[in-house]
Image (tube, helix red, strand yellow):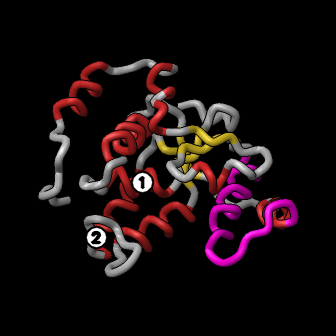
Amino acid sequence: MNHNPEDMVLLDTNILIYADQEQDSHHHVAKMLRDRGQQGKIPVCIAPQNLSEFFAIVTRTGRHRASNPMSPNEAVDEIRKYLECEHIYKIYPTPTTWPILLSILGQYPVIGQDIHDLHLAATMLSNGIKKIYTFNAKDFEPIPGIKVLDPEAIDFIESQEYDEDLEQEYKEEPEDNETAQH
């Protein structure tokens, strides 16, 4: 797998969440994207922050929870799969992450939890990663140096070797998974 930062694309946490949440409207696209990354067909990466956010959201009950919450043990098992996947490159904060974050904050001030997206962007930039797949384009588009890729545009399929068997698998999945269990 090519780990050239210029080719690498970070999977935002929402991709990881929607890939596991069968009832969500973004599930099929997110799962296809994640699976292609896990298979080494597209160069993707994640950061520890993605995994912490994934755990926080998929185990939450009540307001702002996943459509199909997991137990903490189930979430840990999913996180282990990401960590053990040889085709998903892991990036970590570097000594330049905080200076980059402070610079971004000077240009794009935020409050509260919005700092998390900026911290993720700073981690990306400090590792030379400039592209992100996300369903929350508005959170990253204003950040200098970050290019947002819309998973629903499905451009990644056309620009990569495409496995028609994989495409058929997703077409055969039922559209309405209201009763599906994880």
The residue segment tinted magenta is 106-127
Secondary element at image label 1: helix
Q: State whether residue 80 is above or below residue 176.
A: below
**For the residue carrying disc 1, how many other residues have a C-alpha within 10 Å: few (<14), some (14-19), or many (20+)?**
many
Magenta stretch, overall SS: helix
In the displayed image of the protein, which residue is found farthest to the left? Answer: 179
Lateral position of residue 166 relative to residue 112, left or right: left
Lateral position of residue 13 relative to residue 76, left or right: right
Lateral position of residue 152 relative to residue 49, left or right: left
- Residue tagged 1: 16
| Badge 1 amino acid | Leu
Between 175 and 145, the one lying in front of the other is: 175
Residue 177: x and y, percent? Answer: 17, 51
Secondary element at image label 2: loop
Q: State whether residue 70 is above or below residue 128.
A: below
Residue at 68% from the left image edge and 51% from the top image edge:
124
Residue 20: x and y, percent? Answer: 31, 55
| Badge 2 amino acid | Pro
Residue at 47% from the left image edge and 20% from the top image edge:
158
Residue 6: x and y, percent? Answer: 69, 33
Q: Earlier in the sequence, mark 2 or mark 1?
A: 1
- Residue tagged 2: 69
Residue at 66% from the left image edge and 78% from the top image edge:
112
